[in-house]
Image (cartoon, rainbow, N blue to C red):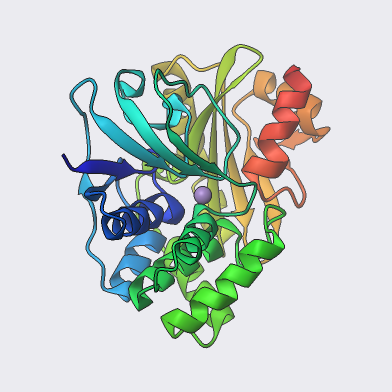
């Protein structure tokens, strides 16, 4: 049996590359594994795979009940393949907080509070004394640069920095900053992407106070692009809220270079939440959330604290 390995829905670079790299690592350890994706690639991830000469993983839509699977870069059912609770999760490599995962049997779990799943995978190669191929190193490095916003996100740890430099040497990336900027430029090149796709570029649903909230983030070097399409994006947020029966939907435009966060706010009820959670005022459907650039470390915990 081939073990499917996949990251979260609305995949980012870490979700995709970690599935590919972990499947490769497992195969070298004698576990037949195949990487999949749970959604379309963003432009940054497409750039990374192309640069590394790696093929796009197949799309996975459903699996028969009881199938054994390995998860990377997530563990919450709300961010995974539908029907996850009916599958048999045998392995998880992740750097997020524990969600609603449970199991009937013992399983392999590797969680570390670092900035990226790629960092943990790099450590696994070392622990198994396996040489890292150039393309594997490039994928892990790319994930680290993506998740840590070139080591600037508050989620970044010394381990991520050390691993990034180590992997860059193997990948033959001599100028890490220049490569990160190339990745971010690819990510920011959104052309005429439909507004609902912009909302879902990096979008996750979280339970706060027993209710569901959708939090989208656009990490970009060109925030003016999103601001110019504010009306369309607000409409997409409104439709998403109704379609998924959510209590709220927010969309943060994060300027990767300036380290600022301008969050789109649908209406007065949403503005009240933003005021309560961050103490921020809303003007023309936009709240300035200052330098809160990490959803994981600065946005989600603030919501959780507010809703207790
Ligand atoms: Mn990640």
In the image, 85: left or right of 228?
Answer: left
Quick check: 126 above or below 2? below
Camera-nearest residue between 64 and 153: 64
Quick check: 41 above or below 142? above
Where is residue 93 shown, x and y percent of the image? 47, 45
Camera-nearest residue between 106 and 84: 106
Quick check: 84 above or below 224? above
Where is residue 235 shown, x and y percent of the image? 46, 31
Which quarter of the figure has residue 210? top right
Which quarter of the figure has residue 307? top right
In the image, 20: left or right of 165?
Answer: left
In which quadrant will I find the N terminus?
top left
Residue drawn 57% across the image and 71% down it: 164
Q: Is residue 68 visible?
A: yes
Camera-nearest residue between 182 and 263: 182
Residue drawn 58% across the image and 77% down it: 165
Residue drawn 32% across the image and 30% down it: 81
Q: Residue furthest top?
A: 210
Where is residue 148 shown, x and y percent of the image? 61, 59
Where is residue 245 shown, x and y percent of the image? 46, 14
Q: Is residue 191 visible?
A: no
Which quarter of the figure has residue 159? bottom right
Quick check: 226 above or below 55? above
Residue drawn 69% across the image and 59% down it: 157
In which quadrant will I find the C terminus?
top right
């Amino acid at each position: 049996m081939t073990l499917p390995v996949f990251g979260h829905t609305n995949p980012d670079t870490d979700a995709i590359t970690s599935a590919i790299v972990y499947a490769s690592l497992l195969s070298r350890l004698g576990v037949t594994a195949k990487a999949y994706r749970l959604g379309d690639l963003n432009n940054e991830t497409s750039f990374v795979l192309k640069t590394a000469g790696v093929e796009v993983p197949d799309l996975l839509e459903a699996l028969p009940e009881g199938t054994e699977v390995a998860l990377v870069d997530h563990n919450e059912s709300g961010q995974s393949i539908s029907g996850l609770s009916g599958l048999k999760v045998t392995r998880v490599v992740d750097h997020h907080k524990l969600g609603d995962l449970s199991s009937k049997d013992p399983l392999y779990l590797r969680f570390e509070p670092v900035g990226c799943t790629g960092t943990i995978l790099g450590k696994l190669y070392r622990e198994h004394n396996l040489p890292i191929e150039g393309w594997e190193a490039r994928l892990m490095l790319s994930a680290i640069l993506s998740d840590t916003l070139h080591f600037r996100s508050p989620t970044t740890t010394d381990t991520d920095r050390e691993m990034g430099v180590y992997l860059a040497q193997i990948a033959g990336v001599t100028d890490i900053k220049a490569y990160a900027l190339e990745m971010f430029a690819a990510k920011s090149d959104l052309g005429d992407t439909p507004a609902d796709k912009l909302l879902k570029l990096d979008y996750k649903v979280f339970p706060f106070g027993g209710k569901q909230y959708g939090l989208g983030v656009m990490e970009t070097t060109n925030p003016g692009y999103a601001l110019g399409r504010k009306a369309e994006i607000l409409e997409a947020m409104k439709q998403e809220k109704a379609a998924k029966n959510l209590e709220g939907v927010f969309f943060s435009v994060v300027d990767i270079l300036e380290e600022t966060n301008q969050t789109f706010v649908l209406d007065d009820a949403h503005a009240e939440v933003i005021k309560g959670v961050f103490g921020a005022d809303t003007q023309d459907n936009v709240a300035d959330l200052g330098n809160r650039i990490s959803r994981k470390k600065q946005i989600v915990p603030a919501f959780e604290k507010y809703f207790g």
